[in-house]
Image: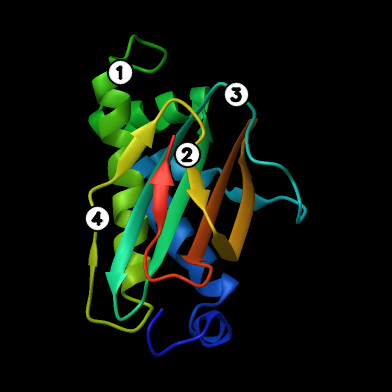
Amino acid sequence: MTGTTVDSQIDELSELDVVSVVEEVWATFLGADAFMPLIPLAPGTPAPADPCWDAAITVAGAWQGIIMISLEAGLAHHVTEAMLGLEPGGEHSTEDVVDAVGELVNVIGGNIKGLVPGPSKLSLPMVARAPIRVSSLVELVRLPLAWGEHQLALVVGVPAGGDSVEVGT
């Protein structure tokens, strides 16, 4: 990371800022369903267990980082229904879930990008029905959350000692 340190990036992005972004985007995506609040879980709570949907988006520019979200499968389907106006409990194509979860991480990532130094660009979202792995990541913020009976986790991180984030499944 040219010109900045991880410590200075931590100062630029607070957990409270990230929580505000996630809550605002969540309310927008879920509409009336958003009245059931996102509940923070204890630090150290593991990410949702399989089966889950993971999505990631990178930020490149004056600030280098990644935003990742992991949703239990049932929650990913609920987000898909709300976003696409589908019948609750109905069948969803894989493409519909990929689109909805990808758009969720894209909007959260775009809002977080607005909180860090620019100029910078967002990548296209990567969505997988498997854990997304990131090499050499320093987590700035980890938010384990519950929404009703479902769990999700959001991570904002920066590369450890490098200029880019390597992402894969």
Q: Residues within 10 Å of mark 1 (few under 14, many from 20)?
A: few
Work out whether 100 lies above or below 109: above
Chain-order first, disc 2 or disc 1? 1
The first of marks 2 and 3 along the sequence is 3
Tell me the amino acid under the disc marked 4. Answer: Ser
Mark sitting earlier along the chain (3/4): 3
Say which element carries label 1: helix
Using the image as rendered, state which of residue 119 and residue 154 is in the foreground.
Answer: 119
Kindly identify the amino acid type of the residue bearing the numbered disc 1: Thr
Say which amino acid is labelled 3: Asp
To which residue does mark 3 refer? 50
- Circles 4 and 2, Cβ within 8 Å, touching? The answer is no
Residue at mark 2 to residue at mark 3: CA–CA distance: 12 Å
Tell me the element at label 2: loop
Q: Which mark is residue 42?
A: none
Residue shown at the point (30%, 55%) measured from the top left: 107
Badge 4 or badge 1: first in the primary sequence: 1
- Front residue of 72/56: it is 56
User: Looking at the rendering, which quadrant does residue 21 occupy?
Assistant: bottom left
Among the two numbered marks 4 and 2 on one chain, the one whose residue lies closer to the N terminus: 4
Task: Determine which residue is flagged by label 1.
Answer: 94
